[in-house]
Image (cartoon, rainbow, N blue to C red):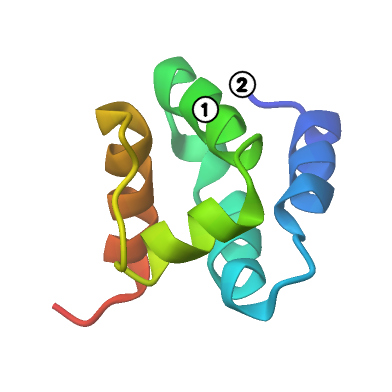
Amino acid sequence: MVEDVEINRLYWHSRRGMLELDVLLVPFTKEVYATLDKVDRDLYVRLLECEDQDMFGWFMERAESEDPELQRMVRMILDRVQPK
């Protein structure tokens, strides 16, 4: 079970100050994070430790992370918002 304190902390870490990232990360934290398994929750925390410019490139699909696990998390977040 994910604690409210953990969700609140990640909510604030997900607010990057870059609108393009905020609109992806904040809703993901609020709506999906608690449903992830431990491995994916840890992976999301790792993603939040990355530089904003790197994440911007990944989420805009201009580049891919060299780490396949981070790229999998990026894809998971993008799949939530992209039309099928």
User: Of helix, strand and loop, which one carries label 2?
Assistant: loop
Q: Residues within 10 Å of mark 1 (few under 14, many from 20)?
A: some
User: Of helix, strand and loop, which one carries label 1?
Assistant: helix
Q: Residues within 10 Å of mark 2 (few under 14, many from 20)?
A: few
Out of 77 and 71, give the one closest to the viewer.
Answer: 71
Seen at 34% across and 42% down, the residue is 65
Out of 25 and 46, give the one closest to the viewer.
Answer: 46
Q: Quadrant of residue 78?
A: bottom left
Looking at the rendered structure, which numbered label has been put on residue 2?
A: none
Extreme residue in the top direction: 38
Residue ID for mark 1: 41
Q: Name which of mark 1 and mark 2 comes first in the sequence.
A: 2
Q: How many marks?
A: 2
Q: Quadrant of residue 46?
A: top right
Seen at 27% across and 63% down, the residue is 79
Q: Position of residue 27 (x, y in %)?
A: 59, 64
Q: Position of residue 48 (x, y in %)?
A: 63, 40
Q: Position of residue 45 (x, y in %)?
A: 61, 30
Residue 10 located left or right of residue 40: right
Residue 47 located left or right of residue 15: left
Out of 16 and 1, give the one closest to the viewer.
Answer: 16
Seen at 61% across and 21% down, the residue is 1
Q: Is residue 71 above or below residue 67?
A: below
Q: Quadrant of the C terminus?
A: bottom left
Looking at the rendered structure, which numbered label has been put on residue 1?
A: 2
User: Which kind of residue does numbered mark 1 sit on?
Assistant: Arg
User: Which kind of residue does numbered mark 2 sit on?
Assistant: Met
